[in-house]
Image: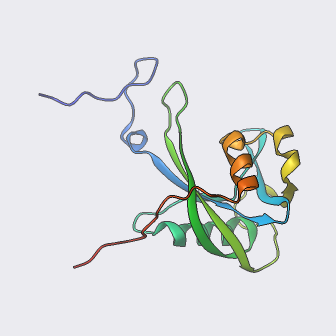
Amino acid sequence: MLARKPKLMDGAEVSPAQQSPRIRVAAIIMRGDELLLVRHIKNGKSYWLLPGGGIEYGEPLAEALQRELREEACLEIEVGDLVIVNDTIPPDNTRHTINLCFTAHVVTGEIACGVDPRVVEVRYMPVNELESLKFYPDIRHELLPAIRAGFPKKALYLGNLWKD
């Protein structure tokens, strides 16, 4: 039996580059009642999101998150627990992102926009202002109660377990 080729909603075939999900790591960094966020401008749209980004092939998740925070916010971080995982798949299936959100805390550095040209602002935002923001992916209804409860539900991330 031949494997079916994935198709977009309009019937067009999905390109080979689109057939693998993008894996994105993100940091949930609190300072009192404030959450560290970055503001992106992409395709003329402005929105807020947790700092982070895509992993590179062969890069452990925690190292990817540390690299991304250096690149986006000029911070060195210690990665904590994996607490939220979600997919982002638009109705037309043009992309698929798997988001892995970890708690983290700042070890050194002062927040500033780094080398990513899409990042136009980095700041701690009061948690009570999150509802008024354009926020992607929109995990606010899950994130806010988890913040208030101190992240009692944690996934177990074991890191790279490869052994010869």
Q: Is residue 4 above or below residue 86?
A: above
Relative placement, left or right, of 39 versus 91 is: right
Q: Residue sitting at 65 percent across and 58 percent down?
A: 151
Q: Position of residue 107 (x, y in %)?
A: 71, 81
Left or right: 17, with 64 as reference point: left
Q: Residue at x 26, y 77 (%)?
A: 163
Visual colour scheme: rainbow
The residue nearer to you, when weighing 99 against 144, is: 144
> Residue most toward the left?
1
Can you name the residue that lies furthest to the top here? Answer: 10
Residue nearer the viewer, 50 or 153: 153
The location of residue 82, given as percent across then percent down, is 55, 60
Image x and y of residue 134, in percent: 79, 39
Q: Residue at x 39, y 45 (%)?
A: 20
Residue at the image point whose x is 40% and y is 18% from the top: 11
**Above or below 76: residue 52:** above
